[in-house]
Image (tube, rainbow, N blue to C red):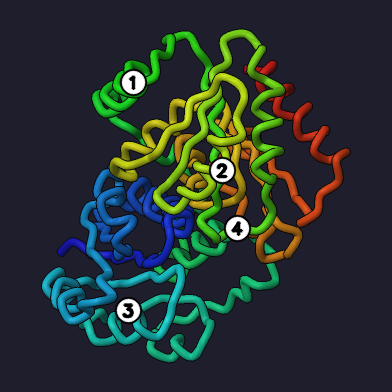
């Protein structure tokens, strides 16, 4: 019989993206497994597009009875939870899953029968590495390496999204896109001010074949309005109103992606594009914990104080130019 494994991460976009290496490792090294993802609504359709995830189950916090029914009907053999809370713990406990693996954290751990001590707050590893370590409780013989890029976008999807974007904004096929996402969704520490994002963009607009694109999510309307009133140079302001998968497809076309450490950064990194990312000084918000899933050489991670000095901002400008010169 086929072993069915459910991996759960039922919160935000970036949190789910850093579990993708878990699915990738299992599908590559144990192709006979049937892999299920348990995710929140924001990630549901996106997870369905990931080639190495076989099935996706919605964690419906408003109807956990239906979620439990779906899991029971799937007859899952093993669950591996990258993050736990009481709701999830009770859900999996009551879903008939015989082996339930989770980090040994919070009172909710008592409802799992294989608990792994990790102490993630000590930041001895990146979040994605803590996630991967959980796989060894399922199969100690696994090698915790994964291939890049994690997100393999179909050529037809890429052509559809990119061609539409080029037509919408009259962009040349030879233009290099520097995508800047100034919003954080309230989930990140360490970020540039709006004025400094504009100054950073303005510092590169005269470079050959460079096209600056500012992107905004549904929670960034106030930031978008503020930026649109201040901008005094040619740049594209793009609101992401389609699917998360289409947005990830657009980000995969970036030559450089610039943002704070937020879900959008992790989406871009899933395609292994070059990223210039800002992190907070707090250890649990640092790149030591939340560095992305892309190759290390593609990551340019910067720790920012709340009141970062002008000298550091000048260094950021120079670093962006240096990245572009290497393309």
**Rendering coords of residue 16 (x, y %):** 42, 57
Instruction: Say which residue appears at 61% left-offset and 34% top-offset.
Output: 230
Q: CA distance from mark 4 to mark 1?
A: 31 Å
Circles 4, 1 touching at the beta carbon (< 8 Å): no
Is disc 4 placed on a helix, strand or loop? loop
How far is mark 3 from mark 1, CA to CA? 50 Å
Q: Earlier in the sequence, mark 4 or mark 3?
A: 3
Is residue 147 at least partly visible in the picture? no
The answer to whether the residue labelled 4 contacts the one labelled 3, judged by CB atoms less than 8 Å apart, is: no
The answer to whether mark 3 and mark 2 are in CB contact below 8 A is no
Numbered badge on residue 99: 3
Give the crowd class for mark 1: few <14, some 14-19, many >=20 residues within 10 Å. few
Q: Looking at the picture, how far across and down is residue 189, in whole percent? A: 66, 58
Q: Which residue is denoted by mark 4 in the rendering? A: 188
Q: Is residue 59 left or right of residue 303?
A: left
Q: Quadrant of the C terminus?
A: top right
What residue would you read off at disc 1?
168
Q: Earlier in the sequence, mark 3 or mark 1?
A: 3
**Label 3 to label 2, Cα distance in Å?**
50 Å
């Amino acid at each position: 019989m086929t072993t069915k494994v459910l991996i759960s991460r039922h919160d935000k976009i970036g949190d789910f993206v850093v579990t993708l290496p878990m699915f990738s490792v299992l599908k590559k090294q144990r192709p006979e497994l049937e892999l299920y993802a348990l995710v929140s609504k924001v990630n549901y359709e996106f997870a369905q597009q990931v080639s190495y995830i076989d099935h996706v189950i919605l964690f419906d916090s408003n109807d956990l009875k239906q979620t439990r029914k779906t899991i029971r009907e799937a007859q899952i053999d093993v669950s591996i939870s990258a993050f736990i809370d009481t709701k999830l713990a009770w859900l999996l406990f009551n879903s008939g899953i015989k082996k339930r693996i989770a980090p040994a954290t919070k009172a909710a751990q008592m409802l799992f029968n294989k608990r792994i001590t990790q102490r993630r707050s000590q930041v001895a590893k990146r979040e994605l590495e803590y996630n991967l370590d959980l796989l060894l409780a399922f199969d100690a013989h696994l090698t915790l390496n994964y291939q890049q890029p994690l997100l393999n976008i179909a050529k037809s999807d890429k052509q559809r999204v990119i061609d539409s974007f080029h037509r919408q904004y009259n962009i040349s096929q030879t233009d290099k896109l520097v995508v800047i996402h100034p919003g954080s969704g309230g989930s990140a520490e360490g970020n540039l001010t709006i004025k400094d994002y504009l100054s950073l963009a303005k510092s590169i607009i005269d470079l050959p074949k460079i096209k600056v694109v500012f992107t905004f999510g549904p929670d960034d309307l106030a930031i978008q309005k503020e930026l649109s009133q201040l901008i005094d140079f040619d740049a594209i302001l793009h609101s992401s109103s389609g699917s998360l998968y289409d947005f990830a497809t657009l980000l995969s076309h970036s030559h450089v992606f610039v943002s704070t450490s937020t879900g959008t950064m992790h989406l871009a990194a899933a395609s292994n594009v070059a990223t210039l990312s800002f992190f907070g000084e707090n250890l649990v918000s640092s790149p030591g914990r939340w560095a992305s899933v892309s190759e290390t050489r593609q990551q340019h991670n910067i720790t920012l104080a709340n009141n970062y000095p002008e000298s550091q901002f000048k260094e950021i400008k120079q670093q962006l130019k240096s990245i572009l010169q290497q393309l």
